[in-house]
Image (spheres, helix red, strand yellow):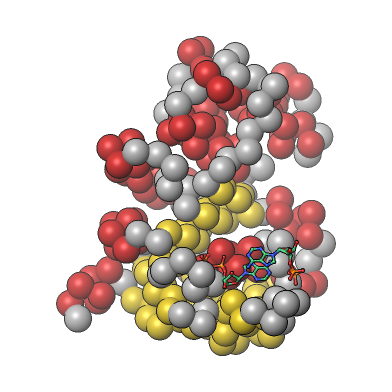
């Protein structure tokens, strides 16, 4: 049974925009799937339907066998980390507090939350001794993305959804973040759905690549090897 299953999923926005049509997509546990395609072809909409930031108009979505429509949205999102390009760290809170927010929210003690946050900073390659007490504006764009990943990992979700997570950083940093994230994803065994408009990034990172086309249709769903053989 797949960790994530989209079955006949479509989304037409209230203004009549047809964003996604008839998407069937299975993501196995521990797999990284990249959604790729030109701007406006429904990638972000598809991603946001998985954690119910957007409700599908048609079709059904299952997480670990459960229809997400039947899940309590708060519980659902606890099991799904979400990382976007504009990470949205709290600017007036230190890095450690930005990462601690989630464990505190879920009732951890302050000491445990702090310890967990420091471990997570370490996991994403930020030395806690050096960075924990800084403020977001004192970090580079790439470092802020790392904090975003740490925060998304804080509830220890089995699934991570990522929308252009490396889009805002320069190419050299991006390659390093991609490599590090691939290693981290494998080590932690996370199931990841990652949106990108960059086919090179998709082929490099994805165990499978879902190519979206105009009109929000899924044109191809294949492994990088299969794609390159065509
Ligand atoms: P939903 O049907 O999922 O509730 P809505 O159609 O109500 O979504 O739109 C949600 C928000 O997105 C609204 O505030 C709307 O103004 C805004 N929005 C409208 N058109 C676009 C667009 N083309 N791209 C991004 N956001 C849009
Ligand atoms: P992508 O992530 O591939 O760039 P999106 O999922 O953001 O594509 O958008 C798919 C289509 O839906 C686009 O035509 C976009 O303008 C439209 N769209 C996105 N959000 C909304 C919204 N809230 N209301 C109406 N149209 C939207």
Residue 133 occupies which quadrant of the picture?
top right
Q: Residue 28 in the image: x percent, y percent?
A: 48, 68
Q: Residue 24 in the image: x percent, y percent?
A: 53, 83
Q: Residue at x 52, y 53 (%)?
A: 162
Q: Residue at x 43, y 59 (%)?
A: 196
Q: Residue at x 43, y 47 (%)?
A: 167
Q: Would you place residue 214 above or below residue 121 in this image?
A: below
Q: Residue 169 in the image: x percent, y percent?
A: 40, 39
Q: Would you place residue 133 above or below residue 41 in this image?
A: above
Q: Would you place residue 208 above or below residue 219 in this image?
A: above
Residue 19 visible in rendering: yes
Query: With 107 as the anchor, is 150 left or right in this view?
Result: left
Query: With 175 as the anchor, is 58 left or right in this view?
Result: right
Judging depth in this view, the residue of 88 and 121 nearest the camera is 88
Q: Quadrant of the C terminus?
A: bottom left
Give the image quadrant in which the ligand numbered 1 is located.
bottom right
Query: With 217 as the anchor, is 198 left or right in this view?
Result: left
Q: Residue 19 in the image: x percent, y percent?
A: 59, 77
Judging depth in this view, the residue of 212 and 187 nearest the camera is 212
Q: Quadrant of the N terminus?
A: bottom right
Residue 132 visible in rendering: no
């Amino acid at each position: 049974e797949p960790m994530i299953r989209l079955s006949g999923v479509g989304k037409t926005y209230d203004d009549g925009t047809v964003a996604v049509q008839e998407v069937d997509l299975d993501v196995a546990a521990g797999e990284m799937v990249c959604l790729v395609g030109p701007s406006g072809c429904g990638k972000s909409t598809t991603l946001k339907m998985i954690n119910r930031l957007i409700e599908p108009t048609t079709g059904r979505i299952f997480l670990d066998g459960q229809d997400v429509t039947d899940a309590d949205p708060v519980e659902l999102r606890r099991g799904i980390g979400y990382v976007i390009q504009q990470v949205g760290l709290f600017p007036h809170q230190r890095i450690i507090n930005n990462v601690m927010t989630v464990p505190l929210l879920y009732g951890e003690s302050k000491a445990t939350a702090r310890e967990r946050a420091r471990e997570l900073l370490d996991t994403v390659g930020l030395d806690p001794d050096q960075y924990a007490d800084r403020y977001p504006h004192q970090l580079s764009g790439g470092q802020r993305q790392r904090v975003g990943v740490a925060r998304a990992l804080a509830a220890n979700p089995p699934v991570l959804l990522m929308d252009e997570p490396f889009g805002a950083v320069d190419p050299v940093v991006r390659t390093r973040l991609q490599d590090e994230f691939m290693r981290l994803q494998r080590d932690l065994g996370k199931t990841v759905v990652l949106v990108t408009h960059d086919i090179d990034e998709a082929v490099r990172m994805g165990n499978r690549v879902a190519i979206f086309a105009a009109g929000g249709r899924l044109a191809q769903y294949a492994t990088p090897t299969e794609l390159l053989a065509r």
